[in-house]
Amino acid sequence: MRDAVVVQAVRSPIGKRAGVLSGVHPADLSARVLQGLAARAALDPALVDDVIWGCVGQVGEQTFDIARTAVLSAGWPEAVPGTTVDRQCGSSQQAVSFAAAGVVAGHYDVVVAGGVESMSRVPMGSSYGTQIPLGELYTNRYGPGMPNQGLGAERIAREWSLSRHDLDAYAVRSHQRADRAVAAGAFDAQLVAIETPGGRVNADEGIRPNSSIEILARLQTPFLEDGVVSAGNASQISDGSAAVLITTSEIARANGWRPLVRVHTAVVVGSDPNLMLTGPIPATAKVLAKSGLSIADIGAFEVNEAFASVPLAWQAEFHAPEEALNPLGGAIALGHPLGGSGARIATTLIHHMVDRGIRYGLQTMCEGGGQANATIFELLA
């Protein structure tokens, strides 16, 4: 019976909006990551059956099937195809799931999954501009206008009794953990340096080790005047890309690759599209039930820090150990390049599992429109 294993996972540094990566075309950023993946894995790109690439803002520089453009921009053979996936913030986590399923089914032998988002060059919401992508039947059911993630984050904070102090303290912890991870070299093996017009970039740009609850408390709450959600306890608007190489154990051995983890279980769920951000809770319940594992079996959890209220509400439901939840910081500190974040989180989780000998790791993300992916990886290295 075929399995799906990850033999390499890499990512670019994450740049801030209008920051160090803003001068790089998103197809070129993707291509650099693909080149880095091939170099790290000693991969002949001609072996790749497909590149499945997540991207949310599929407009302007990120349209025309950016997966295919990235393949060609990387100098890979013209015979290597590419397709682009949009499951909002979970796009590249879904790309990993599609790739794993394709390998298990025998449709692929070697496949690359990942994603990109240049939010500096293609701002959030560019894909629909002034037009609302919701028709009458949708608005009759859920009300007029686009669902607002910030208001969803505020609702979660209220429903789980999370205070401004709770959210700001969590945000400070994210920055502190990311800073410690950098100092310890925890990201070194996963980073691909990117050449930019301003020079070579080899470090994440958004980490603020001197952040404090007192500093964050001064920030406005833009979604509700008396709210608790601010820019300081929400994910950063970012530029970045990541890629994961997936094959079977047998094919890995034949090519001299050492499998790092197995894609143990992967699920996706739908949730309330207005509240939008609670999907990781039912997704986690579903993936645990499907895998036969429990929270106690999992040694590391990555719950995307779209807003601090999301992982805090998740933790309140599952009582996961605090030290195991986003142990190297998350999107509040590192950034959230939408279509690239799922693969970035997978890359960080996989390397952390290998570094610490953690048998099982779980990744989950909330997604626009009310959805969530959840994936369990099992250590093989």
Image (cartoon, rainbow, N blue to C red):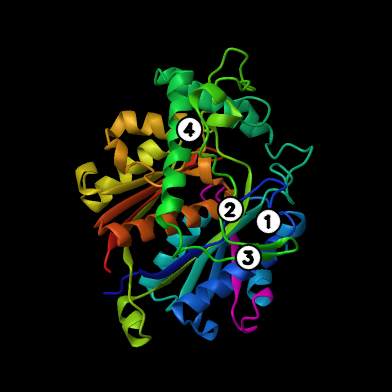
Q: Which of disc 3 and disc 1 is earlier in sequence?
A: 1
- Give the x, y percent position of residue 323: 30, 40
Residue type at tag 3: Ile
Query: Which residue corresponds to mark 2?
Result: 14
Q: Secondary structure at mark 1?
A: loop
Q: CA distance from mark 2 to mark 1?
A: 8 Å
Residues tagged 2 and 1 counted as in contact (Cβ below 8 A): yes
Residue type at tag 1: Leu
The quadrant in which the C terminus is found is: bottom left
The disc label shown at residue 194, or none = 3
- Give the x, y percent position of residue 343: 49, 57
Q: Is residue 122 left or right of residue 333?
A: right
Query: Which residue corresponds to mark 4?
Result: 171
Highlighted magenta segment, given as a residue range: 73-90
Q: Is residue 287 left or right of residue 179?
A: left
- Placement of 258 over or under 223, stated as above or below: below
- Placement of 220 over or under 280, stated as above or below: above
Q: Which of disc 2 and disc 3 is earlier in sequence?
A: 2
Instruction: Specify the quadrant of the image occupied by residue 249.
Output: bottom left
Q: CA distance from mark 1 to mark 3?
A: 8 Å
Residue type at tag 4: Ala
